[in-house]
């Protein structure tokens, strides 16, 4: 039996707010739609838990100006 390298899976969601308009960009690599929904639910749960714990840095912010 061959040793196969596990496939990398990635789900990236990018939000841009320009002049009060929200742009969303989603890229998926080796992730099924069902897995993507599960990953988004996990991210939502983690964010809500961090808010409940009053963590100051819930998001990583990048300013591209």
Image (tube, rainbow, N blue to C red):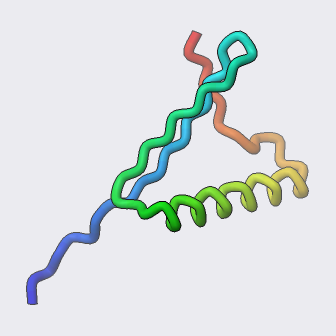
Q: Nearer the viewer, residue 30 or 49?
A: 30
Position of 21 with respect to 11 (left or right) is right
- Is 58 drawn above or below residue 38 in the view shown? above
**Residue 2 in picture, x, y percent from top left:** 9, 83
Task: Identify the image quadrant of the C terminus.
Answer: top right
Position of 27 with respect to 60 (left or right) is left
Q: How many marks?
A: 0
Q: Residue at x 21, y 70 (%)?
A: 5
Position of 17 with respect to 12 (left or right) is right
Q: Residue at x 58, y 61 (%)?
A: 37
- Is 18 drawn above or below residue 24 in the view shown? above
Quadrant in the picture for residue 58: top right
Task: Identify the image quadrant of the N terminus.
Answer: bottom left
**Residue 48 in picture, x, y percent from top left:** 81, 55
**Residue 57 in picture, x, y percent from top left:** 76, 41
**Residue 38 in picture, x, y percent from top left:** 59, 66
Q: Nearer the viewer, residue 5 or 28?
A: 28
Position of 36 with respect to 51 (left or right) is left
Q: Which residue occupies the extreme bottom position in the image?
A: 1
Q: Which residue occupies the extreme front position in the image?
A: 33
């Amino acid at each position: 039996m061959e040793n196969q390298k596990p496939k990398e899976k990635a789900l990236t969601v990018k939000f841009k707010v320009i002049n009060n308009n929200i742009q969303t960009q989603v890229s998926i690599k080796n992730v099924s739609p069902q897995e993507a929904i599960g990953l988004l639910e996990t991210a939502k749960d983690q964010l809500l838990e961090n808010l409940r714990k009053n963590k100051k840095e819930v998001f990583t912010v990048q300013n591209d100006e």
